[in-house]
Amino acid sequence: MTFAWQDNLTGARSSFVSHLECSLTGAHYEADQLHGLSAAGRPLLVRYDLDGVRAELSRETLAARPADMWKWRELLPVRDAANIVSLGEAATPIVSLPRTGARLGLADLLVKDEGRLPTGSFKARGLVMAVSMAKALGVAKIAMPTNGNAGAALAAYASRAGIETIILCPDDTPEINVREIAAQGARVYRVDGLIDECGAIVGEGAKQGLWFDFSTLKEPYRIEGKKVMGLELVEQLGWRVPDVIFYPTGGGTGLIGMWKAFAELEAIGLIGPERPRMVAVQAEGCAPVVKAWENGDEHFERWEGAHTVAAGIRVPKAVGDFLILRAVRESGGFAIAVPDDAILAAVDEAARQDGLLLCPEGGATLAAAQLARERGLISGSDKVVLFNCATGLKYPMPDASRRLAKSGPIDHAAL
C-alpha cells in the first residue's frame, strides 16, 4: 500500500538532467558519472532541460503534491526514486517575529525555520541529495570535514544508504554534534584545527583513493538539495520573492543554491525576473566574504585566526567563493559581519520576545538585520526573510532556573 505522503518518493516522475557544467569555465561534463571538482578545480553545477521541465511542471501540479522537498523532483538530480534515502524532508515553516520586527522598525520580519528538518538542520537538504546520488553512482566510502550539523546529516543519510563514512571536525565542535555523528554510525575524529584543515586531510585521503571527498561544493549535488530552500520559499510566499534574504554564510552552498533556484523558476515560467537582495551574513571573527565584497574582489583569501560562537559559519576559505560573491552582487545585496555579543543577544531576544529559539547562525542573521536597518541598508517596508539553519535545542543554554523547597513556607505571590 502506498500512502499519499509517499507520492513524491515513489510516484513516476520524468528526469530532466542534461549535463554538469563547470561554474568557472562553462565546460560540460557527462551526467550520471561520478565527478568531484571540474578540471579547473571549481564546483560543477547540475543543468536541466528547462524547456522540458516547463512543459511538465505548473503551480497547480506542485500544489497538488505533498509538501516536502521531493515534490520538486523534476528539478532535482536523482533519476530513480529507488535511490532516494529520505528521512522525511518536509517543507519547513515560515515564522514571523512580530515583536522583534516592531522593535527594529520592520513591518514584515520572517524566519524560514530549517531546524524542523531531519537531524535538526538545513544540512539535511544538501546531504540527502548528495548521498542519494552517491548511492546511485555506486560510492562505497565517504569522508567529509564538518563544523557539526553537516556531519550529523551525512552520518544519518549514509547509514541509511549503507555507505561507510568518516567525518573530521574541529576539536571545539559543539559536543552534541560530535556525539550525534557517532550515534548515527559514522567514525568521527576531533582534529586540532579548523574546518579547512580538516578538509585538507580528507582531500589527501581522496587523492590516495581511500574514499570519495564530500567536502562542501566538491561534489555537484549538495547544492541541488540546498536550492530547494529557494523553490520552497517562493511557493510559500505566493510565488513572489521577498525583498531581502539574510543568509548565514560559511561555505555558501545554500546562498548559491537559492540564486540558482530563482533562475530556474523564471526559466520554467513560475516567477518573473524579480529577485531578492541576497545578504551574506558572517561573524566578525571569520568574515572572508565580507572583506572580499568590501574590497571588490572576485575571490577571497583565507581568514586567519577564525573564531566565533556560530561554528557553522566559521569557514576561513570556501571553494565556491566567487559564486557567493557573484550572487550577492548580481542581486544588489551586500555582505555584513556581526560581533558574537550581538549574535547571542539576538538569540536571546527572539526566544524571549517571539518564542522562537534560534541557533547561533540564525541569531547572526537577526543581528545582521538589525545592523542593516540601523545603517539604512534595508527599509521598514521590506519583506525580510532570515534563515535559521538549525534548531536552537542543539546548543548550550544558560541555566536561569531557581530553586524552590517544597517543605517550608512558600510565598506564592513572589514566584
Image (cartoon, helix red, strand yellow):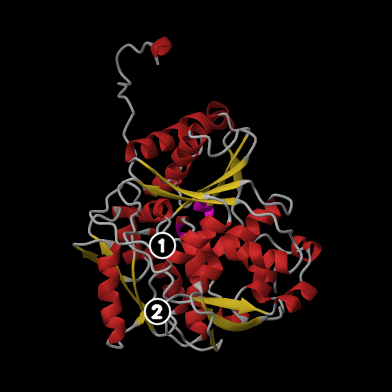
Q: For this view, does 168 lie left or right of residue 390?
A: left
Question: Residue 228, position in %: x, y?
Answer: 60, 63
**Part of the protein shown in magenta:** 114-119
User: Who is closer to the viewer here, 159 or 24?
Assistant: 24
Task: Kindly identify which numbered label has been placed on residue 78.
Answer: none
Q: Quadrant location of residue 7?
A: bottom right
Q: Position of residue 157 (x, y in %)?
A: 46, 71
Q: Quadrant of the C terminus?
A: top left
At x 58%, y 61%, the residue is 259
Q: Nearer the viewer, residue 49 or 28?
A: 28
Q: Looking at the image, which residue is at 73% across and 54% down?
A: 239
Relative to 101, does residue 91 appear above or below in the rendering?
below
Q: Main secondary structure of the magenta part?
A: helix
Could you tell whether 194 is left or right of 159 in the image?
left
Label 1, label 2: how many angstroms apart (C-alpha)? 16 Å
63 w.r.t. 136: above or below: above
In the rendered structure, find residue 41 and report the number of the disc placed on it: 2
- Coordinates of residue 202 in the picture (x, y in percent): 29, 75
According to the image, label 1 marks what residue? 251
